[in-house]
Image: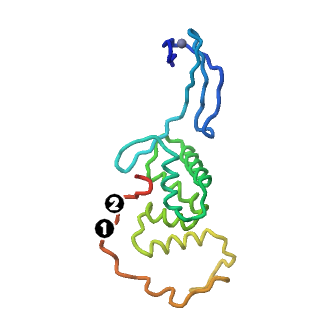
Amino acid sequence: MHCPYCHNADSRVVDTRIADDGASIRRRRECTACKRRFTTLETSLFQVVKRSGVIEPFSRDKVVNGVRRACQGRPVSEQDLALLAQQVEETLRASGVSIVSSEEVGKAILPYLSDLDQIAYLRFASVYRGFKTLDDFEAAIAELRGRQDVPDPAPAQDAVPAGESKAPGARQARRRPRRTAAAPEEPTLLDG
Ligand SMILES: [Zn+2]
């Protein structure tokens, strides 16, 4: 890399630091000609292709913003969101590819978000997976329940787990006619 002051092609590294939790390396360099110092930032190329086909650098901020919307009013801190975004990035980078789809980003978010807050998870999943009916929510809730430790391995049909009271009529009026209004074409939490 040329010196930004005198354009000499040679410089020596005087300091190297891991930055951004290991996602990049910052190097302090000194020009061998004019002796002035400058900093370079080295980041491995990691990109996201959106549904529109637009390719952009992976951004933890975008992950945080998308998930934050699903977390409104929930006990989730900014630190939780930052950690989630870091975990998502690490998971995706560990797959070894340099480009992922925004769908894959959403899919990588889901398990971390379900660990963080189940209501936020359902909100996020409803957009990301395009839930159209209450059945979709029911299936997702059943999945969440399945992941929790359930001591009784074989609940009888229609059994109520201990400690949970089942309100009468809770299972009524679940099947309404499907709405014909068009669902949004694509998730908006991440693609905004
Ligand atoms: Zn120079």
> Crowding near pointer 1: few (<14 within 10 Å), some, many (20+)?
few
Query: Relative to 99, is 15 above or below?
Result: above
Mark 2 touches mark 1? (CB < 8 Å): yes
Query: Relative to 70, is 63 above or below?
Result: above
Q: Amino acid at mark 1?
A: Ala
Query: Relative to 117, is 64 above or below?
Result: above
Q: Between 40 and 89, which is closer to the camera in this rendering?
A: 40
Residue that carries the numbered disc 2 in the rendered image: 185
Left or right: residue 11 compared with residue 174: right
| Residue sitting farthest toward the bottom | 168
Q: Secondary structure at mark 2?
A: loop
What residue is shown at x 49% (from left), y 59% (from top)?
69
- Could you tell me residue 59's position as x and y percent? 49, 44
Q: Amino acid at mark 2?
A: Glu
Residue that carries the numbered disc 1 in the rendered image: 182
- Could you tell me residue 41's position as x and y percent? 55, 29
